[in-house]
Image (cartoon, rainbow, N blue to C red):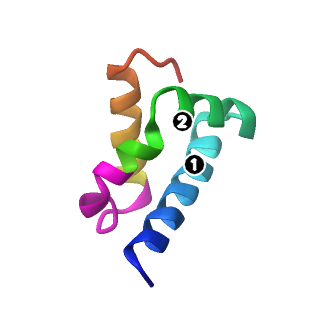
């Protein structure tokens, strides 16, 4: 699997984890991910995210969002 494919799968998996963890529908979660550039953040953190578990990555994303002023 290429890095690009792996990154895409991580982004999708974390999006779905965020929906479940934060009790959001797909549209609201998409709005947050797009507004705060979460997909770009995941790409930037890829080297760490692909070796950590989903919960650790989701916790990191939550901290990132809170630092940006997002309300989850």
Label 1–label 2 contact, CB within 8 A: yes
Residue lying at 43% horizontally and 69% vertically, measured from the top left? 4
**Which mark sits nearer the N-terminus, 1 or 2?**
1
Residue interval drawn in magenta: 43-54
Q: Nearer the viewer, residue 24 or 41?
A: 41
Residue lying at 34% horizontally and 31% vertically, measured from the top left? 64
Q: Secondary structure at mark 1?
A: helix
Would you say residue 25 is visible in this rendering?
A: no
Q: Secondary structure at mark 2?
A: helix
* Front of the two marks 1 and 2: 2
What is the crowding at mark 2: few (fewer than 14 residues within 10 Å), some, or many (at least 20)? some
User: Which quadrant does the N terminus fall into?
Assistant: bottom left
Reply above or below: 62 against 3.
Answer: above
Q: Is residue 18 left or right of residue 50?
A: right
- Image x and y of residue 31, in percent: 63, 29
In the picture of the structure, the residue carrying the numbered disc 1 is: 15
Would you say residue 21 is visible in this rendering?
A: yes
In the picture of the structure, the residue carrying the numbered disc 2 is: 33
Reply above or below: 61 against 11.
Answer: above
Residue that extends furthest to the bottom in the rendered view of this protein: 1
What is the crowding at mark 1: few (fewer than 14 residues within 10 Å), some, or many (at least 20)? some
Q: Is residue 1 left or right of residue 21?
A: left
How many numbered discs? 2
- Image x and y of residue 5, in percent: 49, 73
Separation (CA) of disc 1 from disc 2: 8 Å
């Amino acid at each position: 699997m290429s890095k690009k494919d792996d990154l895409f799968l991580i982004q999708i998996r974390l999006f779905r984890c965020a929906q479940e963890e934060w009790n959001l529908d797909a549209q609201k979660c998409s709005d947050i991910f797009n507004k705060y550039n979460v997909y770009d953040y995941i790409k930037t953190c890829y080297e760490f995210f692909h070796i950590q578990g989903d919960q650790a990555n989701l916790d990191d994303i939550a901290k990132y969002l809170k630092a940006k002023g997002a309300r989850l």
